[in-house]
Image (cartoon, rainbow, N blue to C red):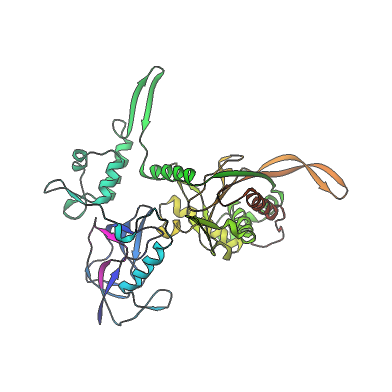
Amino acid sequence: MKIIDMLMPPLGESILECTVLGQLKAEGEMVSIDESVLEVATDKVDTEVPCPYEGKLVTWLVKENDVVAIGSPVARIEVNQDVVETSDGKSENHSEQDFADILESDMAQHTAQEPLAGEVKAPEAVNTDDQHFFSPLVLSIAKEENIGQQELSSIAGTGLNNRLTKNDLMSYLERREASPRSGPVLATKSEDGANEIIAMDRMRKMIAQRMLDSKRISAHVTSFIEIDMTPVVNWRTAVKDRYRKSTGNSITFTPILIEAVVKALKDFPMMNISVEGDNIIRKRAINIGMAVALPDGNLIVPVIHHADQYSLSGLAQKVNELAMKARNNQLKADDLSGGTYTVSNIGAFGNLMGTPIIMQPQVGIMAFGAIKKKPAVIETEHGDLLGIRSLMFASHSYDHRVVDGSLGGLFLKRVNDYLENFDTKQKI
């Protein structure tokens, strides 16, 4: 028997620390490999941490509301052997040096503006009096929601020693927003009546900052093309009922659009890049971000990693899975990291075209508009004809620092070609 320290694993690109929300296993309980034992919050997502070992949880080294650095010990596990098997079947001994190597590799991908691991200082927790302890996460949310210390102290907590947890605060905010007499909505008088001032929530503030950063960093240029989607529309109409009956899921246009983008990225690898200072980083993996609108009106971009390794059926399943996880707030940090190119299906909202903003540090994003039946000229070997076709505008925003008009335009045209020459005989 041996006691091994369980270390906080990497939780996604650029995440250096997290806040403990709760323990899912008690001291003395047996745990299995990949069984969730800890719930944590990062600046991107709340997620559960699995145990890499099988054995008995001897003692916790962290408690609720603790801010924990990636790679630091969180629990001690009693195992039967020195080297344990991970869930993928590989033998692995998770030493502190292992995580140091992981962190060093992760940090090597960051830009010079980002702080190094050794420079990160966790925000301090605050004791306002003997009864009230507020974690850094709670204080951060309270600041963003304009909640003062007096109001914060009045909220009942359900944590250890009645401490206020993130869930307590979020529940309070939901109740406050539902109340007509309170909440972040203020009224101010003007000459033409009353105006409502609505405070941004935490996610909207992050979206706003990232969009401003992207416009400041990248030289945005947008190209447009009109695509004849008639072959795709006819094929989908023929297979969608059978696909739903056999899988229980729907097949939307999104996986078909993503497949065309993936093929074009393989043809034009210099669109699958990022910029770090004066260096261009060409990505080997093709990881497609897909913009998803949330029920609260916010936007999130989960990522299909190694999208070039999926069949069309596999892409359809992955698109449905990530969209459902996004709308049910079940995405993990890894689901949101590592994207190399992004697509947005704005046609789902009835929009014809748009000029999307690039997701940093990527250099391109493509928006697909609504598919509309229109009269069009059809060229045949016997002459031109006038017919009804299903047409769609696509717009490609790209970073003109590193992507010239020829590359940006040819890439968009290649996506067009793959969709207009879609194989209508393929099975799914």
Q: Nearer the viewer, residue 330 or 73?
A: 73
Q: Quadrant of residue 171?
A: top left
Q: Which residues are magenta?
A: 62-76
The spot of residue 31 in percent (x, y) is 30, 72
Image quarter in which the C terminus is found: bottom right
Left or right, residue 75 beside residue 48:
left
Which residue is pictured at 38% across the width and 42% down the height? 205
Image quarter in which the N terminus is found: bottom left
Farthest-out residue, left: 130
Asked whether the viewer can see residue 248, the reply is no
Q: Is residue 146 shown above or below 31? A: above
The spot of residue 52 in percent (x, y) is 34, 72
Count of picture labels: 0
The spot of residue 19 in percent (x, y) is 28, 56
Q: Nearer the viewer, residue 407 or 369?
A: 407
The spot of residue 348 in percent (x, y) is 57, 44
Q: Nearer the viewer, residue 185 or 24?
A: 185
Farthest-out residue, right: 382
Q: Is residue 412 shown above or below 147? A: below
User: Is residue 259 inside the magenta stretch?
Assistant: no
